[in-house]
Image (spheres, rainbow, N blue to C red):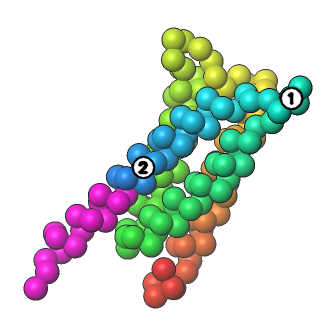
Amino acid sequence: MTSEHTTKQPEHGLIALLALDALLLAIIELFFLPSYLGPVQFPITAAVAAVTNPLLVAVAAKSTANGAACWAPVLVWFLTVFVLGVFGPGGDVLLPAQDWRTYLLIAAGVLPAAAMIGIVRNAPPGAR
């Protein structure tokens, strides 16, 4: 006999762990965004965000029946990128508005994850 309280605890723990993963990924992706490959700007972290954020959403959707919990990794990632990017460490602006890499990182992090949320929310309950 399992109560609803004991079965919900692992879900909350996993969602919190996925949110922590999103936070750490956002920090790493933000700090390595201005990287270069030789003399060429090479924002590889935008590609990392485009792959990892939908994976975090898919794992969140698989672990819980709560549809709103799927948004947790994306929201944590976006808030971390925004707060650190605008009010960065020591007052540095890490996401300048006139840099194309800023828009690439935000689009690559949010759009594929939002598409994954649409996919998992419209999937039949047994398919998750």
Q: Is residue 3 above or below residue 75?
A: below
Specify the quadrant that holds the N terminus: bottom left
Q: Could one spot residue 51 in this view of the protein?
A: yes
Tell me the kind of residue under disc 1: Gly
Location of residue 100 with respect to 110 vertically, above or below: above
Nearer-the-camera pick, 106 or 53: 53
x and y percentages locating residue 80 in the rendered image: 50, 35
Give the overall secondary structure of the magenta segment.
Answer: helix
Query: Residue reaching furthest left?
Result: 1
Residue span colored magenta:
1-15
Q: Quadrant of residue 9?
A: bottom left
Other-residue count near label 1 (Cα within 10 Å), few / some / many at <14 / 14–19 / ≥20: few
Is residue 30 shown left or right of residue 62? right
- Give the percent coordinates (x, y) of residue 3: 13, 77
Residue annotated with mark 2: 19
Q: Earlier in the sequence, mark 2 or mark 1?
A: 2
Secondary structure found at label 1: loop
Identified at 86% across, 29% down, the residue is 38
Q: Where is residue 48 shown, x and y percent of the image?
A: 66, 49
Q: Is residue 117 left or right of residue 3?
A: right
Amino acid on which the number 2 mark rests in the picture: Ala
Up the image or down, 102 lies above or below 21; here it is above
Q: Which residue is mark 1?
A: 38
Q: Position of residue 5 (x, y in %)?
A: 16, 69
Labels 2, 1: front one: 1
Q: Residue furthest front?
A: 38
Other-residue count near label 2 (Cα within 10 Å), few / some / many at <14 / 14–19 / ≥20: many
